[in-house]
C-alpha cells in the first residue's frame, strides 16, 4: 500500500484551453492547460517541464478574448509533461 498523501488543497477541473506563457527565461509560447483549480493550473509543454520550482511566469488566455488579463504565477512542481503553477494574486486588488 502506498504511503503517498494527497497534497492538493483545491479540487481540479479537467479543462483544456490554450494559453500564452512567458517569463522564467521563456519567450512567449502558446500551449494548453490540462486542468484548473482555485489555486492554479497544470500547463503542458516540454519547455515548462524544464523550469525550476519557484520560477515566476506570466499566463494569459489565448482563446481570442479581447485584452485578457495576465496572471502572475509560480512554478509549484514539474513533471515530464509540463508544470503545475500556483496563481500569485495581489489580494489588495480584490478588496
Image: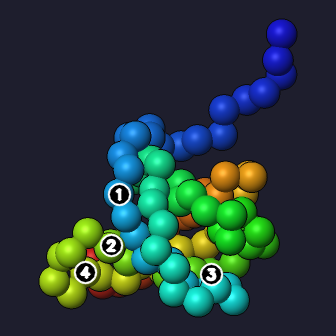
> Of marks 4 and 3, which one's residue comes earlier in the chain?
3
> Of marks 3 and 2, which one's residue comes earlier in the chain?
3
Contact, mark 2 vs mark 1 (Cβ under 8 Å)? yes
Q: Furthest-left residue in view? A: 66
Numbered tag placed on residue 61 in the rendering: 2
Numbered tag placed on residue 83 in the rendering: none
The correct choice, above or below, for 48 with respect to 82 in the image is below
Numbered tag placed on residue 68 in the rendering: 4
What residue is shown with label 1?
Answer: 17
Q: Nearer the viewer, mark 1 or mark 4?
A: 1
The correct choice, above or below, for 58 with respect to 15 in the image is below
Contact, mark 1 vs mark 3 (Cβ under 8 Å)? no
Distance of mark 4 from mark 3, alpha carbons? 19 Å
Residue drawn 32% across and 73% down? 62
Q: Nearer the viewer, mark 1 or mark 3?
A: 1
Q: Tag 1's secondary structure?
A: loop
Amino acid at each position: 500500500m502506498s504511503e503517498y498523501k494527497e497534497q492538493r488543497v483545491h479540487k481540479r477541473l479537467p479543462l483544456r484551453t490554450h494559453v500564452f506563457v512567458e517569463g522564467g527565461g521563456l519567450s512567449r509560447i502558446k500551449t494548453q492547460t490540462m486542468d484548473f483549480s482555485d489555486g492554479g493550473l497544470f500547463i503542458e509543454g516540454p519547455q515548462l517541464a524544464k523550469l525550476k520550482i519557484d520560477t515566476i511566469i506570466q499566463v494569459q488566455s489565448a482563446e481570442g478574448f479581447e485584452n485578457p488579463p495576465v496572471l502572475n504565477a509560480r512554478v509549484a512542481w514539474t513533471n515530464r509533461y509540463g508544470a503545475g503553477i500556483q496563481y500569485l494574486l495581489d489580494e489588495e486588488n480584490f478588496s
